[in-house]
Image (cartoon, rainbow, N blue to C red):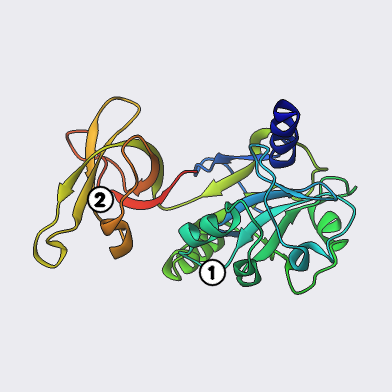
């Protein structure tokens, strides 16, 4: 009986991992003129299979009934999001085991309709928006200057970056150069291996996190940490995402900034 209950609980928490389209990194040698660009929201990706919201790894989110009651029967792909710079809060809300009222502060922002036919705009056109379902605005790229200007505007507002896509294509589930993420910085992941004491206004708190990168290099990351994260930093062994702006002459990430902890 206990074994049956465990299997039931596991099956209710996890579903088949969805096949999704994924982004490559943009480089200036790729001509994206006449493609479509949109803001890359810093939320939690979720796949609607017609009945439930699923993470990219197959976890079933405990979305409350009031949030999904007007969702369609067809599949959707998008981002659970609240506002710019609020990833940690969004992640905390959607990863709770039980449905909670905090979902009322979120929206499901659609950038793809896997079941639909036609080009990108034709697929998005069939989405029926409501209080919780929104469609991410797509803007046709005039030229590289237009893209650079849009990226600058988004980042100045605290946004993560931009997505550019060849909107003429039918839906596909894979990673290639027809869908790209555009950022003025580089983001990377590392493993937390230690903490460094803060000074001045951060005395008694964590001043920076020591983090090991894939190449075994250990760096310190202090910028980007909020006060509550300095009081309760990511645990040793946790994987965090940070951004930086190129490399120093010694090959170290320049100006590393903490972004968020990976679930």
Residue at figure coordinates x 65%, y 34% from the top left? 175
Could you say which quadrant of the image residue 100 lies in?
Answer: bottom right
Q: CA distance from mark 1 to mark 2?
A: 24 Å
The residue closer to the viewer here, 37 or 74, is: 74
Per the image, label 1 sits on a secondary structure element best described as loop
Rate crowding at label 2 as few (under 14), some (14 to 19) or many (20 or more) other CA atoms within 10 Å. Answer: some
Per the image, label 2 sits on a secondary structure element best described as loop
Residue at figure coordinates x 51%, y 56% from the top left? 92
Residue at figure coordinates x 70%, y 58% from the top left? 63
Q: Which residue is mark 2?
A: 255
Q: Position of residue 119 (x, y in %)?
A: 83, 50
Q: Position of residue 204 (x, y in %)?
A: 14, 59
Could you say which quadrant of the image residue 205 lies in?
Answer: bottom left
Residue 42: tell me if it is visible: no
Tell me if residue 214 comes above or below residue 231 in the rendering.
above
Q: Earlier in the sequence, mark 1 or mark 2?
A: 1
Rate crowding at label 1 as few (under 14), some (14 to 19) or many (20 or more) other CA atoms within 10 Å. Answer: some
Q: Is residue 90 left or right of residue 215?
A: right
Residue 27: tell me if it is visible: yes
Q: Which residue is mark 1?
A: 83
Could you say which quadrant of the image residue 65 lies in?
Answer: bottom right
The residue closer to the viewer here, 263 or 260, is: 263
The residue closer to the viewer here, 258 or 246, is: 258
């Amino acid at each position: 009986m206990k074994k049956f209950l465990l299997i039931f609980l596991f099956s209710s928490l996890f579903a088949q991992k969805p096949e999704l389209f994924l982004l490559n990194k943009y480089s200036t040698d790729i001509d994206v003129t006449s493609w479509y660009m949109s803001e890359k929201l810093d939320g939690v990706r979720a796949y609607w299979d017609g009945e439930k919201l699923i993470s990219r790894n197959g976890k079933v989110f405990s979305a409350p009934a009031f949030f999904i009651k007007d969702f369609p029967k067809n599949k959707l792909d998008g981002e659970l999001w609240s506002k710019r710079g609020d990833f940690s809060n969004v992640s905390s809300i959607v990863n709770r085991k039980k449905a909670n009222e905090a979902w009322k502060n979120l929206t499901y922002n659609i950038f793809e309709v896997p079941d639909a036919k036609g080009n990108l705009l034709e697929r998005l056109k069939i989405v029926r928006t409501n209080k919780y379902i929104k469609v991410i605005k797509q803007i046709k790229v005039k030229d590289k200057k237009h893209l650079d200007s849009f990226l600058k505007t988004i980042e100045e507002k605290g946004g993560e970056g931009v997505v550019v896509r060849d909107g003429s294509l039918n839906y596909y589930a894979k990673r290639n150069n027809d869908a790209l993420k555009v950022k003025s910085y580089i983001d990377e992941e590392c493993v937390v291996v230690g903490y460094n004491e803060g000074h001045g206004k951060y005395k008694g708190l964590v001043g920076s996190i020591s983090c090991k990168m894939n190449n075994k290099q250990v760096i310190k990351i202090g910028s980007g940490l909020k006060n509550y994260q300095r009081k309760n930093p990511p645990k040793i062994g946790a994987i965090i995402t940070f951004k930086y702006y190129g490399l120093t002459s010694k090959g170290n990430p320049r100006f590393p900034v903490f972004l968020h902890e990976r679930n």
